Image (cartoon, rainbow, N blue to C red):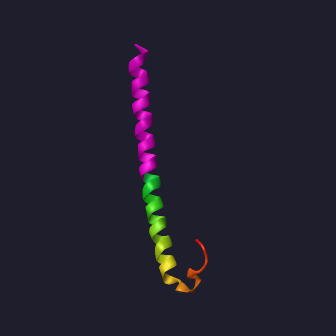
Amino acid sequence: MNNKIIIYCLNHYFDRVCRLVELLYKSLLHSRSRLYSALSLRPRANKSQPC
């Protein structure tokens, strides 16, 4: 009888985790593109330095 409740809780938990991961991924992509644009605005004099 408790199996249904456990499965429901697991589904709910995984749904929330997936949503959170998606949100984090989108914000990561957004900040990454902002970082790339900021790097491309800089002069390319510091190319000799290692990343």
Identity of the residue furthest to the right in this view: 49
Locate residue 48: give its quadrant. Answer: bottom right
Q: Main secondary structure of the magenta part?
A: helix
Residue at 41% x, 46% y is 19
Q: Choose top left, top right, bottom left or bottom right for residue 25.
A: bottom left
The percent coordinates of residue 7 (x first, y second) are 40, 25
Report the residue at 53% width, 85% height from top. 44
Question: Which of the image's four quarters has the N terminus?
Answer: top left
12 relative to 50, above or below: above
**Is residue 30 depicted above or below 11 in this figure?**
below
The residue nearer to you, when weighing 3 against 42, is 42
* Above or below: residue 30 compared with residue 18: below
Which residue is located at x 48 percent, y 66 percent? 32
Q: Position of residue 11 (x, y in %)?
A: 39, 32
Is residue 5 found inside the magenta-colored segment of the image?
yes
| Residue at x-position 43% and y-position 28% | 9
Residue 5, position as x, y percentages in the image: 41, 22
Residue stretch rendered in magenta on the structure: 1-22
